Image (cartoon, rainbow, N blue to C red):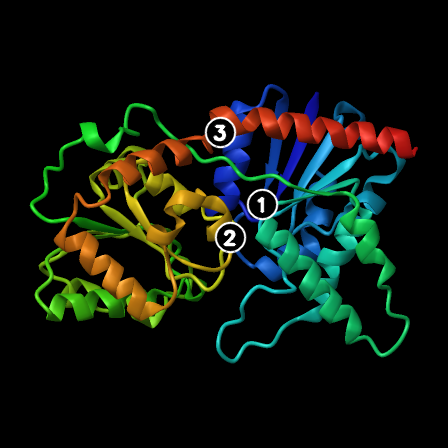
Amino acid sequence: MKILFLEPFYGGSHKAVADGFAGCSGHQVDILSLAPRFWKWRMRGSALAFVRQVENFNDYDLVLATDMVDVTDFKALAGPQCPPVALYFHENQLSYPLEPGEKRDFHLGFTNIISALAADGVFFNSQFHRDDFFSAAKRLIRKMPDLRPGWVLDKIRDKTRILYPGIDLDSRSCVIPETQPSSLDRPLVIWNHRWEYDKNPKAFFNVLERLKRRGILFYLAVMGEQYDTVPKAFRGIEDRFCAELLVCGYQEQAADYRKWLAKGSVVISTAIQENFGISVMEAVAHGCFPLLPNRLSYPELIPGQVKPDVLYQDDADLETRLEHLLVQPGAYRDKTVALAAHAAGFAWAHMAGKWDKALYQVIGSSRSRN
């Protein structure tokens, strides 16, 4: 099978998923990509850009597009030669949290809805995301003054599936924690998320500052990609955590990134938006114990027996749990080992076969409808 992968925002987790699947799939996967900027214009114009780059659509058995592609435009422009199209939702513009002062562009939300309707198969990166999409789509349709097309949601729902993304793991650096003595004299706290408002860095740094004032010892690794606008919470962290900060900034080399994950003791998320959590699962696979909010996609990614230890309710609860881990870093060693093994199950070496099977089924479903 030959798959054409359309990624109009080739950066961060979008790039990681495209590269990870293409590298591990049993099929030939050709990636067409655009630079990760001007995301609203990508949604409006990427179909025009991509369709001109394909010499012969008959060369492909399937198109796999991500959520910033307008599938209706792409299929119309490609014409009758267009193979079946599967749509993968990393996020959606119906429920993505807005920055302060920003107004929601309902046109972009409708683009997601109509693209899902036009696609031959629709995949979400978590059950949470799927449910969130349909709830938000229903609210948007109710805002219409008349001719509310509620029927489209049933049509879309019938062709949706959950398809977790894989994570990029190197078995040489992904070590079972109990065989990996730390070279550090304090626990290392990991931030490996995007430097953006939806990851809620203010809450993260506020918790750490309160612990620091109480004399709780820790080291800090602040990684993750940065884009044009960096939240105020990151300003001055070199001074605020001068005794704790061991690394600050995006790690260009994967080996350097994995090295810091392997040194880590705990990875924290304070996100207000997360449809899967690739960075968290990467850190967990390298032996970091996770402290995650009891919301978003996180509850479905954590095994039931350790949820009470991992999922916190609010910032005060996070602070209490983190202090316990920093003061007694070996308290959850057995659970950390079990969680690392669980997270390693998301490696692309395991997940690519599931993607291959799911995408092949889209072709079969499309043929049966035609």
Q: Residues within 10 Å of mark 1 (few under 14, many from 20)?
A: many
Front of the two marks 3 and 2: 2
Cα–Cα gap, marks 1 and 2:
9 Å
Q: What element carries label 1?
A: loop
Q: Residue at x 55, y 36 (%)?
A: 18
Cα–Cα gap, marks 3 and 1:
14 Å
- Residue 219 visible in the displayed image: no
Mark 1 or 2 closer to N-term?
A: 1
User: Badge 2 is on which residue?
Assistant: 297
User: Badge 1 is on which residue?
Assistant: 125
Q: Quadrant of the C terminus?
A: top right
Q: Residues within 10 Å of mark 3 (few under 14, many from 20)?
A: many
Is mark 1 in CB contact (under 8 Å) with mark 2? Answer: yes
Amino acid tagged 2 = Ser
Residue 348 is labelled as 3
Q: Is mark 3 on a helix, strand or loop?
A: helix
Amino acid tagged 1 = Asn
Is mark 3 in CB contact (under 8 Å) with mark 2? Answer: no
> Closest to the observer: 96 or 75?
96
Q: Where is residue 91 in the image (x, y as percent from the top left)?
A: 59, 54
